[in-house]
Image: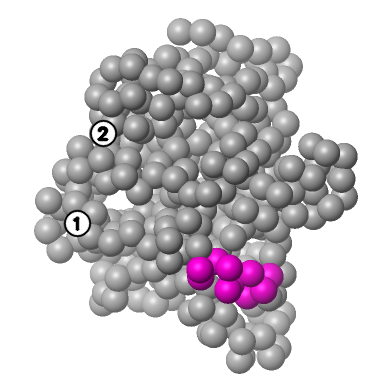
Amino acid sequence: METALAPDNIAINLEDIPCPICQKYDDKLILTGNDRLHGLPGEFTIVKCNKCGLMRTNPRPTIDSIGLYYPEDYGPYLSTNIRRKIDKQESKASSFFKRVMRPVYRKIVRFNTACLPDLQPGRLLEIGCASGSFLHHMATKGWDVHGIEFSSQAAMIPKKMGYNVHVGPLETAPDPKYYFELIVGWMVLEHLHDPISCLKKLRSWATSETWLVLSVPNAGSLEFKIFKNRWYALQLPTHLFHYTPYTLKKVMNAAGWEVKHIYHQRILSNLIASLGYFFSDHNFTRLGQKLINFPENPGKYGHLIFYPLAWLLSKFGQTGRMTVWARIK
């Protein structure tokens, strides 16, 4: 166990862990990087298992220390705020974009809600539900929604709206009384300290008819190869694992899940923000920051502008985000 000093001289405990698939330390160094999202201290390394190819952040903050790197202004907490989204939708209810363009926009770009199996409403569990916007969206479609969220601050919002949310890591969540028909996690698997044991836990909450749908950054994409430690989706140290389609299947199989489909999302947010890091590092600060902000503030038509290139890259599995559908083996 190592320690590092964070702001206000808070000690951050670091742990050195083997590859969760091979249980070995047979690795090669891929890169070193730091926390670009919030500028918090620490230098972290990514290593790659020589046997199975899974990349991981190692050493890494322990589960008791990682919370420092999830401040209250952490992007997903803000972007999934239910009340903010409801107010925004109501204020623009009569706009042209709301009435005409938004259905086309969502279908073309294939957001997470468009990457779901065609199911009748039932019981749904969202891992890492943040401030609850997806839970609320699915509840309005008739689903009985449940969530798990690490941040008590973020979870407070959906809990106040009456949604059933367990506050804490997935590892401490109690077993539910019923099975779920759908389990989802949007950009959460890469944050889990022990993904295989967590996936096994989810397996015990599922039936042979349950769909598990997860989205993760694609570390097998050109974006990662080009930008390396400037890749926006690297997000050290909160991203503990860095999956390619191959290693994602390996982890899922090790936990008893069989991957049925992998969808490469037709969206270039990571690439654009990575360009922002590049320009910022070369003293083009204003342009760089504008590009870095793109994933959270793309504007009405931002994704549509880049859609032709995103569509082409997705055909070759080279966009920076992927969504996987899996069922119990």
Badge 2 element: helix
275 magenta-colored? no
Residue drawn where x is 65% and y is 38% of the image: 230
Residue for badge 2: 197
Badge 1 element: strand
Q: In this view, does 316 lie above or below 203?
A: below
Q: What are the residue bounds of the magenta stretch? A: 302-312
Left or right of residue 69: residue 40: right
Left or right of residue 132: residue 41: right
Q: Estimate the x, y position of residue 199 in percent, counting from the top left.
A: 26, 42
Q: Estimate the x, y position of residue 321 in percent, counting from the top left.
A: 48, 55
Looking at this view, is 269 or 171 the one in front?
269
Measured Cα–Cα span from mark 2 to mark 1: 16 Å
Task: Specify the amino acid type for callout 1.
Answer: Arg
Q: Residues within 10 Å of mark 2 (few under 14, many from 20)?
A: some
Q: In this view, does 309 lie above or below 54?
A: below
Residue for badge 1: 327
Mark 2, mark 1: which one is toward the viewer? 1
Q: In this view, does 273 lie above or below 18?
A: below
Q: Estimate the x, y position of residue 228 in percent, counting from the top left.
A: 59, 37
Image-quadrant location for residue 79: bottom right
Looking at this view, is 295 or 275 the one in front?
275
Q: Estimate the x, y position of residue 232 in percent, counting from the top left.
A: 62, 44
Q: In this view, does 58 lie above or below 152?
A: above
Q: Residues within 10 Å of mark 1 (few under 14, many from 20)?
A: some
